Image: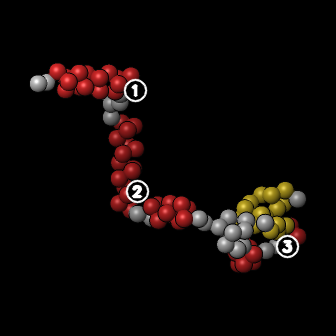
Amino acid sequence: MKTIALEKDSPTLADVLRAATDDEVVYLTRGGRASFAVVPLDDADAELVAQRGNVRLMDFLTKCEERARTQPRKSLRELRSQLADESERSAAKP
């Protein structure tokens, strides 16, 4: 862990990034209190960045969100009842 005091050191972004290593967090402080943290990406973070850059995926998710907000919804109770009814009908078929 490294700490850089913003009011004392006045680092540039390049300075902060040089201070960061693969496994080390760099804390930027103001008045002795941590205000920001520069954290290295792990595999899950890198995957999230890649997903957010996928225009087709983001369009799909936006449409799903809009559909969920505007179209009729069912409660969990309604879904359970519907599944139970379907299961009973399915079991009753020869």
Q: Tell me if I can see residue 6 in this picture.
A: no
Image quadrant where residue 45 sits? bottom right
Query: How dense is the environment of label 3, judged by Cα within 10 Å: few (below 14), some, or many (20 and up)?
Result: few
Label 2 belongs to which residue? 58
| Label 3 residue SS | helix
Q: Horizontal and vertical percent for residue 21?
A: 70, 74
Q: Residue at (33%, 30%) from the top-left corner?
A: 72
Classify the position of the N terminus by image quarter: bottom right
**Element under disc 2:** helix
x then y, percent, for residue 41: 60, 66
Residue lying at 37% horizontally and 38% vertically, measured from the top left: 68
Amino acid type shown at disc 2:
Met
The answer to whether residue 70 is visible is yes
Residue named by callout 3: 9
| Residue at 39% across, 50% down | 62
- Three-letter code, disc 3: Asp
Q: Are marks 3 and 1 in contact (CB under 8 Å)?
A: no
> Residue 27's spot in the image, x, y percent?
77, 63
Q: Which residue is mark 1?
A: 76
N-terminal of the two: label 2 or label 1?
2
